Image (tube, grey):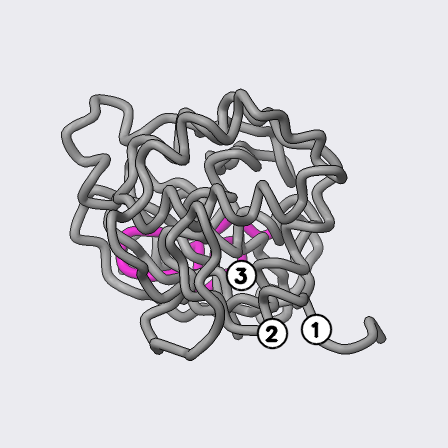
Amino acid sequence: MSLLRLHVAAGRLVRVRRGLYASVSPGADAGGFEVDPYLVASRLAPDAVVAYHAALQFRGKSYSVWHRVTFLTATKAKPVAFRGTEFQPVQVPRALRSLPDGGGGVLEERHAGGTVRVTTFERTLVDVLDDPRLGGGWEEIWRSLEMVEFFDLDAVVKHALTRPALTVARVGFFLEQHREALMVEERHLAPLRGRVPRQARYLGTERESGHVVKPWNLVVPPLVLERSWGAVP
């Protein structure tokens, strides 16, 4: 029997997947030992970065609690399920693959006795508007981002301008809609307006009917335009 198997059999290690094990605290029961999901995600690929909804949840700014942790990677990592949590790898967005740092906006933070690489609030805002499926849909995205008290808006604009025109328009619309709360200035919106789609585009892929919002050239459903999700429980 290999040394790893001996440690697993003795309850000193738990197997997450092939080649990845978690150390069990002395005296703890291996069967019920809780392994921090963000530490797990950070080690599922050499370049793994906790991102999208998981980045908001990591910092306590998600409207809903998910048992799915999304991480960015340039590798061909595969999804993993471990103790009730799904770990979903997502390829770095195409627009960022030629950049040496994968688009930047990544911090390494100490957490649960280890370190986690996670996207900043500014990068996360752009990421979830770039791929709203990974943010949980419009209501989840809006309510989660509205929990963040402060964004470095210059960084948000910088990240947005590396993305496709539709994403730029979504970011511009969100910032303008939250202009007062986030202290958005004209200098933040002006460069975004210069990169919007030439023709009106639907806010989401489901092509919901709505109102064309200028100057962003977005067809925005009333639910999002009015933020009429209903009363917060």
Secondary structure state at the residue bearing disc 1: loop
The label shown at residue 228 is: 1
Residue drawn at (67%, 60%), measured in percent from left and top? 143
Stretch in magenta? 7-24
Q: Amino acid at mark 2?
A: Leu
Q: As shown in the figure, which amino acid type bears the numbered disc 3?
A: Gly
Secondary element at image label 2: helix
Image x and y of residue 87, in percent:
40, 62
Q: Position of residue 113 (x, y in %)?
A: 63, 35
Q: Quadrant of residue 165?
A: top left
| Residue 33 falls left or right of residue 105 | right
Relative to residue 14, is residue 148 depicted above or below? above
Disc with the residue nearer the chain's start (1 vs 3): 3
Q: Please give the label number shown on residue 11.
A: 3
Which residue has dot 2 on it?
Answer: 223
Marks 1 and 2: in contact by CB < 8 Å?
A: yes
Q: Residue at x 46, y 27 (%)?
A: 190
Find out whether the residues at labels 2 and 3 contact each other: C-beta distance under 8 Å. no
Q: In which image quadrant can residue 95 be found?
A: top left
Q: Residues within 10 Å of mark 1 (few under 14, many from 20)?
A: few
Q: Residue at x 46, y 34 (%)?
A: 117
Camera-side mark, 2 or 3: 2
Q: Nearer the viewer, mark 1 or mark 3?
A: 1
